């Protein structure tokens, strides 16, 4: 029985594989970070006006101790 032979790749092939790996990795990283940045921008764009509106409503209405309690 013959032992498995390990193929040795040439130096040029190794370099091309590393460059391809970095190229594909950078594309994937760019897509993921783009999506995260877009979601963060959307959340901030929505959440800041909502937080200001909630703060204004609470400030205008004042402290109310008339909350209904259901027992």
Image: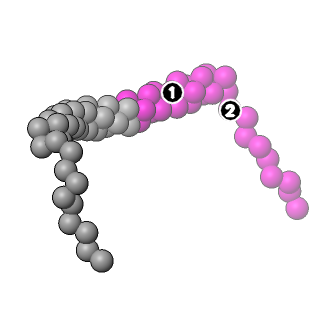
Label 2 crowd bin: few (<14), some (14–19), many (20+), radius 10 Å:
few
Report the residue at 34% width, 36% height from top: 36
List the residue tagged with mark 1: 22
Res. 31 in view: no
Please state which of residues 66 and 37 is positioned toward the viewer in this rendering. Answer: 66
Q: Disc 2 and disc 1: Cα gap in Å?
A: 19 Å
Identity of the residue furthest to the front in this view = 65
**Image colouring:** one colour
- Where, quadrant-wise, is the N terminus in this rendering? bottom right
Please state which of residues 57 and 32 is positioned toward the viewer in this rendering. Answer: 57
In this picture, residue 27 sits left or right of residue 50 = right
Report the residue at 20% width, 66% height from top: 68
For the record, the magenta segment spans 1-30
- In the image, residue 55 sits, relative to residue 13, either above or below, namely below
Residue 19 among those drawn in magenta:
yes
Report the residue at 22% width, 54% height from top: 65
Q: Nearer the viewer, mark 2 or mark 1?
A: 1
List the residue tagged with mark 2: 9
Q: Position of residue 7 (x, y in %)?
A: 73, 40
Res. 69 image quadrant: bottom left
Identity of the residue furthest to the bottom in this view = 71
Q: Earlier in the sequence, mark 2 or mark 1?
A: 2
| Res 7 label | none
Q: Position of residue 56 (x, y in %)?
A: 14, 36
In this picture, residue 46 sits left or right of residue 30 = left
- In the image, residue 44 sits, relative to residue 57, either above or below, namely above
Please state which of residues 3 and 48 is positioned toward the viewer in this rendering. Answer: 48
Most common secondary structure along the magenta stretch: helix
Residue 41 among those drawn in magenta:
no
């Amino acid at each position: 029985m013959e032992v498995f032979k390990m193929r040795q790749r040439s130096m040029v092939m190794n370099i091309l594989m590393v460059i391809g790996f970095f190229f594909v990795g950078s594309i994937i990283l760019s897509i993921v970070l783009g999506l995260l940045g877009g979601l963060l921008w959307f959340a901030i764009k929505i959440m800041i006006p909502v937080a200001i509106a909630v703060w204004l409503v609470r400030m205008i209405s004042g402290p109310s101790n008339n909350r209904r309690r259901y027992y």
